[in-house]
Image (cartoon, rainbow, N blue to C red):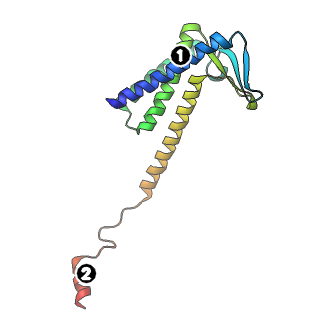
Amino acid sequence: MIQILILALVILGVVGLDQLTKALAVAYLQPQGEIPLWKGVLHLHFVRNEGAAFGMFSNHRWIFMVFSTVAILGLTVYLFRFCKEKMWAKVALAMVIGGGIGNMIDRLSTGSVVDFIYVALIDFAVFNVADSFVCVGAGILAVYLILTAIREEKRKNVTPPEPGAGEETPRDQTDDAGQ
């Protein structure tokens, strides 16, 4: 029960943080458009994104919304009903779910997602807190799955010793002692 509460709090925390930062961006950043935090490296840059991640599929909004809704519901059911993974993998999955819900709230309420974090140093797409949680959570899950696969492969490659191999039987001990 504690685990379910922790995972629910992670999801709600991600959604809450995402919605708070987006509300602040709309209130304070939208009128200015852009604020360099570290000129040429990291800027706050207000954008409304009508597509999927990084503006993809902007002309297919409803298809993406249906896919996102099904994915969020599927991941949530899996997390709370069937997931037998370690807790840190479950938290990572909760981060992905929370980020998905945060962006879905925007899509349903305004038809677009508020993005405001811009890494000018590499001219990367403008993103938001929800996107960050989805990417970090997915990255943690990827590492977890890779480590699990490596562990399983090592376990398969370890051949169990043949019965009696390397062990002395009581008869062998008697024969050695008797000679």
Q: Residue furthest bottom?
A: 179
161, 170: nearer the viewer: 170
Query: Can residue 139 be seen in the rendering of this structure?
Result: yes
- For label 2, the SS is helix
Residue 123 horizontal side relative to residue 20, left or right: right
Give the quarter of the figure containing the N terminus. top left
User: Residue at the spot x=45%, y=50% of the render?
Assistant: 151
- Residue 77, image x and y in percent? 39, 25
Q: How many marks?
A: 2
Residue 125 lies, with reference to residue 106, above or below; the image says below
* Kind of residue at disc 1: Met
Q: Nearer the viewer, residue 74 or 46?
A: 46
Q: Taking the image as drawn, is residue 60 in sight?
A: no
Q: Quadrant of the C terminus?
A: bottom left
**Image quarter for residue 121?**
top right
How crowded is the residue under tag 2: few (<14 C-alpha within 10 Å), some, or many (20+)?
few
* Residue name at image x 74 percent, y 30 percent: 41
Q: Is residue 169 above or below residue 58?
A: below
Q: Position of residue 30 (x, y in %)?
A: 68, 11
Q: Amino acid at mark 2?
A: Asp
- Give the labeled residue for mark 2: 172
The numbered mark at residue 104 is 1
